[in-house]
Image (cartoon, rainbow, N blue to C red):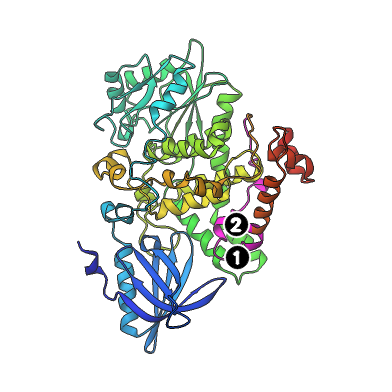
Amino acid sequence: MEFAELIKTATVESVLLSCAGLPAVKGTLCITSHHLLLSSCPGGDSQPGTVELWLLIRNVDAVEKRLAGSSGTITLRCKDLKVLQLEIPGMEECLNIASSIEALSSVDSVMMMYPFFYRPQSLKLEEGWNLFPLEQYFQQIASQTSQWRLSNVNRDFTTCPTYPPAVIVPAAVDDDALRKAARFRQGGRFPVLSYYHPKNGTVMLRSSQPLTGPNRKRCREDEMLLGTVLDEGERGFIIDTRSAQAAKQSSYPRWRRLHRPLERGRPLQESFIKLVEACNDTSINMDRWLSRLESCRWLSHVKAALSTACLAAQCMDREEASVLVHGAEGTDTTLLVTALAQVILDPSCRTLVGFQGLLEREWIEAGHPFHLRCARSAYSHARLKQEAPLFLLFLDCVWQLSRQFPFSLEFGEHLLLTLFDNAYASDYGTFLCNNEKERCLCKVKESTHSLWAWLNQPGEKKKYLNPLYSHNALVIWPSVEPQSIQLWQGLFFRWIRSSQYLDEAWAEIERLVEGNKPPVKESAGNRLSRSLSDPAARTENER
């Protein structure tokens, strides 16, 4: 397929671009294979035009057109929730532009996407892809215990098509037993180590559901694998995130099952759509807004996810018991819970680099199907298939943690917004495909740039740091009371309401922190929490 075949009209003059909160701009609209550009008309013959719009077409979620006389208006609703309007002179040009954008934004072939063509001068292709090897994570665990080993049982992806080539498993279980256990788990996702808690040696495992069936089948190797995790007399917890209908009693007498159903498919996507619709409706009154906010149930999903992650963390840290987390397929709510629990438990996961490593390990390599789940955002008119904003729900939960513990995360909201944007449409290959097997087949790591390489450049990295950060070695236990869960306005109102004053306030905080660094080793967070009158700030520092 040639991109040129999809572009019916490449250039249109005198197009008026408008976007909420910004003045309208007239200029020349151009369509390329991957971008929509608008260059404003120059002020004089000698002055070049200014590029007012540089939109990755993959970011377009829905195209709406309205014709009036000899001209037309195209509304572009983007996956990052931005809404743009283009007033185009000429009916034929308007229809052609709309048709071209629809066709280009619907290209589903991974290897035709922009990351395979993007070549920034400041980066090398190999940079960033090996920043967080599983071997390095395993060595940290191996330095504290000899009960685990790194297995290459999945080196050719035949044992489990959605697992990475290497996984961490109990040292007492050989690869043949792992293969047999895999056949008893949906999609071959047998229990593997997700997190080792250094405080007390407990572990968190993750897997998919066991294939017990109506006859309540059992698997000796699967039971043995879970049995080797527990010492004599110990008991563990299975946190089951499936629906009540799907969850069944299992044959693991030393493991107590805790049922915590979490939505993962169509209900979650529809909740996201309804919330965005409510946020964009500026005509509603207070009662109507509160009613729509409640009926979309997004904040209920946030609360449920945080509560379940807290339960997993509590089992490990306070009950001193190991945990197995699984849903149905083990690629959605399972990863949501294991990743969130680690942010709560482990201060290293709350650093900028540690958080990136967590995402690589628990979302990307663990096989969350980004290509399927993030194919469409909140505006698409297409019939829902397998889209679901699980990763956005995770980012929202992390934002809730950052709001309740403003000094404990090294990164700020800007990083979370950037991750949301890149999961849905990106210049980089990090979130492409559904699993490591697909990335290998598409040669993603050989042919695209890594998002981590870009984020970790010194000039970029500074944008994502939290100026108030103070290392906190403690577990951060969030409040999950309904009153404590707030709407993430920085995301859902990002293009509706100007953030100018908030941005200026953060810039001033950064300036104060930079200019007020004392000679003694005292962090900005500790210093500010003493001086600020905010009781929440004081409370966090006292924890």
Q: Secondary structure at mark 2?
A: helix
Name the magenta segment's main secondary structure: loop
Mark 1 lies on residue: 497
Residue at 26% from the left image edge and 74% from the top image edge: 8
Mark 1 and mark 2 in contact (Cβ < 8 Å)? yes
What's under tag 1, amino acid-wise?
A: Arg
Q: Which residue is under mark 2?
A: 489
Q: Amino acid at mark 2?
A: Gln
* The C terminus sits in image quarter: top right
Please determine whether, in this image, residue 389 is positioned above or below residue 254: below
Mark 1 lies on a secondary structure that is loop
Decide which of tag 2 and tag 1 comes sooner along the chain: 2
Q: Residue at x 70, y 41 (%)?
A: 517
Above or below for 345 versus 497: above
Give the extent of the magenta segment. Answer: 475-503
Report whether residue 244 is seen.
Answer: no
Q: Which residue occupies 66% across, 64% down?
A: 287
Q: Which residue is farthest left? A: 1
